[in-house]
Amino acid sequence: MSLLPGVGVLRGYQRSWWRPDLMAGLTVGAMLIPQSMAYAELAGLPPQYGFYAVLGPLLLYPLVGTSRHLGVGPEPGTAILAATGVGVLAAGDPGRYLTLMAALALVVGALAVLGSVARLGFIASVLSTPVLVGYITGVGLTLLSSQIAAFTGVPVEADRFLPRIGELLQGLGSVHLPTLAVGVLSLAVVLGLRRVAPRVPGALVAVGVATLLVWLLPSAGVPVVGAVPEGLPAPVLPDVTVADLTALLPVAAGVLLVGFTDNVLTARSIATRQGYRIDPNQELLALGVTNLSAGALQGFPVSSSASRTAVPAALGSRTQAVSLVALALVVATLLVLGPALALIPRAALAAVIVAAAIAIIDLPGYRALWRVSRPEALLAVAAALGVVLVDVLVGVLVAVALSVLVALARMARPHDAVLGDQPELDGWVEVDAYPGARVEPGLLVYRFDAPLFFLNVDRFRSRVLDTLEHNPGQEEWLVLDFEGVGGLDATALAGLAELVDTLPERGIERIAVARANAGVVDRLRRVALLAPEGPLHHYPTINAAVRDFRASRGPG
């Protein structure tokens, strides 16, 4: 049961839950029909492949996942990322493109399952908020530019944002007005219903209205989807070589990182409000299983949709039975509605993608970052430019690199402080933040707020020496508050030993370490830095060290 947490939820199903689950499932299924087709085309595939990609995930996620609301299936960010990577490898061969796309889903699934076994669920935190805001915004702009041809009828051959905009400006005279009208009308319906009636499946309504108009006015010449094969796909393993799989690995890693981060953030946002918890490692397994099923059924990599996650929660659904109801609706569509799907105008599907792009361009996120930290807001801009000016896969790498650089920069130059005694607060506080805090003559209490390792040990050493030099009075004792020092590496231990060796010549009679955790104490003891073998005296609290200091100075 630990591998199938959803089974436990479904086994405890209560009769009162079926009505909201049924309504939410029908709504999600209605959203999935146009979105699956649109995102398949975004991935460079015929529209029916969107249905192929979602059948397995809708069946398996309710059993394996820990979210009761996550809307699994095709998602524009991973779709365009997959298309970017596979397009290069397929080299213009449509049959090979289909095969590689299914193989990519299998590789993503295999990596996710292996990551779950290795307990790598923490990778959901690799992308920091500023970088994630920038990356998502860049994807949104890329999505907008990718739909220029389908939305306006202007022929666009470029595969980058700026060249696409340039081709649009040059081809304004060739805009196909009926196609543009269908696209604008569909987009207006989607955005309007999103605002005034968010529970209504606006994409389905828009596509339905557009399809009816095009059917009534065939002379307008608006391009339509065309024949959609009826029936369910048969499980098939793609015919690829080891070299193909090796070439797909970097693309799969990018898709996995983006998809998993999106899954966990979306699932957590709903779970927190609904009062249950998400297990990142189990979600990594669930992402792996759903992608394996999508690849086996000739689909493409899948993730989750924020809109298809929020709707069930808003409708009061309680379990992932929602996915099973949506699955039944998708199966019925494949078996019965093929002729109707063929009449859907491509401009309407483009409008669905444009609406999704508008939703994920995170202008409020930029404003919030600008208020909190302008450097982080500029990082978000840099991540967006990496996606827009180069390509989505490079944008992912830029985003990860920026996240790592930000984290390293913060650990290399962390906050530190001199502490003083504040009796009314019953503790030692930062003297800069609490002017009333008393600095004990002859005693310096110093805190460094980061693990000590090779990247920041030199800064630690120089900050201690600078503080001793500029602190008023003649210090006799130095107490290092190690509450914020979660760990020490070999370089840090060596640097700490060098620092300790130089302090007696500066008049320091005793060097104490206070509030160090058990792991840090053990490391200090292993290299003989702790008394009685070494010069450092360990105290469980700052007050314990201060009592010894005061006792050493005698009465008064």
Image: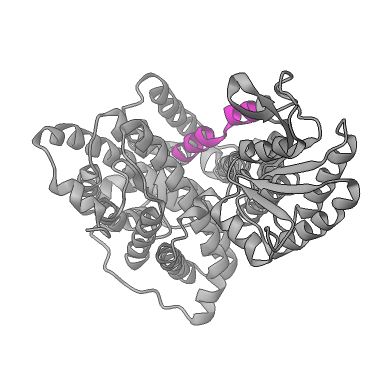
The part of the chain drawn in magenta is: 351-369
Q: Outermost residue toward the left?
A: 15
Q: Is 29 above or below relative to 365?
A: below
Majority secondary structure in the magenta region: helix
**Residue at 36%, 42% in the rendered image:** 34
Q: Quadrant of residue 228?
A: bottom left
Q: Is 379 above or below relative to 494?
A: above
The quadrant the C terminus occupies is: top right
Q: Quadrant of residue 526?
A: bottom right
Instruction: Provide residue 174's location: percent of width, then percent of height.
Output: 62, 39
Residue 205 shows up from this direction: no
Instruction: Provide residue 282's location: percent of width, then percent of height.
Output: 36, 55
Instruction: Provide residue 439's location: percent of width, then percent of height.
Output: 76, 28
Report whether 491 appears left or right of 142: right
**Residue at 46%, 42% in the rendered image:** 265
| Residue situated in front as seen by the camera: 399 or 519 | 519
Residue 5 shows up from this direction: yes
Asked whether 217 falls inside the magenta stretch, the response is no
Report whether 190 appears left or right of 89: left
Report whether 553 appears left or right of 143: right
The quadrant the N terminus occupies is: bottom left
Instruction: Provide residue 469's location: percent of width, then percent of height.
Output: 90, 39
| Residue situated in front as seen by the camera: 364 or 201 | 364
Q: Is 228 above or below relative to 181?
A: below
| Residue situated in front as seen by the camera: 438 or 85 | 438
| Residue situated in front as seen by the camera: 438 or 410 | 438
Asked whether 366 falls inside the magenta stretch, the response is yes
Q: Outermost residue toward the bottom?
A: 242
Q: Quadrant of residue 438?
A: top right
Query: Which colour scheme appears in the figure?
Result: one colour
**Residue at 44%, 61% in the rendered image:** 119
